[in-house]
Amino acid sequence: MNFSSKLIEEAVSAFASLPGIGRKTALRLVLHLARQQPEAVEQFAEAVAKMRRGIRECERCHNLSDTPVCNICADPRRDQSLICVVEGIRDVMAIEDTGQYRGLYHVLGGVISPIEGVGPAELNIDSLIQRAQAGGVREVIMAISPTIEGETTIFYISRKLKAPGVNISTIARGISFGGELEYADELTLGRSIVARVPYKGGGEE
């Protein structure tokens, strides 16, 4: 791809570095911005920069937030006794879009995967155990993608989580094994949350 402008080439390379954006799509975006008023482009760039400067992790659930505690954790209308454990931020968004869940969340930041060098210490597991053992939690819902790594993560957490009165459940298998939670349609995902089942894989020490 040849460019008559070095500035265009650099902008295309910047957009193409984003996930899911190829160089042809990046070029379309750059040419679109090049036709806009400078003020509009500056507002666009400032919105992205402002987001990056201000965004942070919720100190309770590790969801993205503008404030130390995210809007979900701070909402008194949410069921504080339910914690839905997910792999990532997009899973929170997917479940919220179903409108079927009104509890809290806990974002692990991934799943246990020895092949990729991801162990329990690299995930937000200790903070989950602390939340569950602090009291007031009656159920921890494992809404983790049904993959081998996901099942391993659920098993590990279930062995670590031994809090009196706290039940562990998993989403119903409306989502096929090996599927990614964030790509499930809203109806299937919503039903899987509502029809969750007790987790039986933990066992006793």
Image (cartoon, helix red, strand yellow):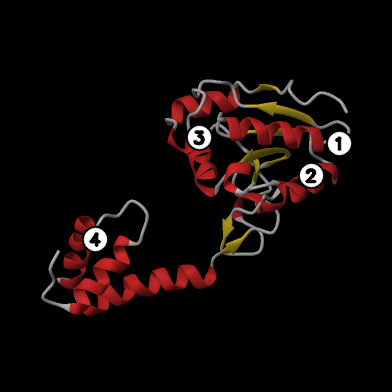
Q: Is residue 22 above or below residue 136?
A: below
Please indicate whether residue 31 sits to the left or right of residue 94 in the image: left
Residue 132's spot in the image, x, y percent? 80, 42
Residue at mark 3 to residue at mark 1: CA–CA distance = 27 Å
Which residue bears the numbered disc 1?
Answer: 163
- For marks 2 and 1, the one nearer the N-term is 2
Can you tell which mark lies on residue 26?
4
Callout 4 secondary element: helix
Residue at mark 3 to residue at mark 2: CA–CA distance = 23 Å
Residue at mark 1 to residue at mark 4: CA–CA distance = 50 Å
Residue 27's spot in the image, x, y percent? 19, 62
**Residue at figure coordinates x 65%, y 39% from the top left:** 85
Inspect the image, locate mark 4, and give the three-letter code of the amino acid beneath it: Ala
Query: Residue 201's image quarter?
Result: top right
Callout 1 secondary element: loop
Residue at mark 4 to residue at mark 3: CA–CA distance = 28 Å
Residue at mark 4 to residue at mark 2: CA–CA distance = 43 Å
The quarter of the image holding the N terminus is bottom left
Q: Tell which of 82 and 109 is nearer to you.
A: 109
The reply to whether dot 2 and dot 1 touch (C-beta < 8 Å) is: yes
Callout 2 secondary element: helix
Which residue bears the numbered disc 2?
Answer: 129
Neighbour tally class for label 2: few under 14, some 14-19, many 20 plus, Cα within 10 Å: some
Residue at mark 2 to residue at mark 1: CA–CA distance = 8 Å
- For marks 4 and 2, the one nearer the N-term is 4
Inspect the image, locate mark 3, and give the three-letter code of the amino acid beneath it: Leu
- For marks 1 and 4, the one nearer the N-term is 4
Residue 15's spot in the image, x, y percent? 30, 64
- For marks 3 and 1, the one nearer the N-term is 1
The quarter of the image holding the C terminus is top right
Neighbour tally class for label 3: few under 14, some 14-19, many 20 plus, Cα within 10 Å: many
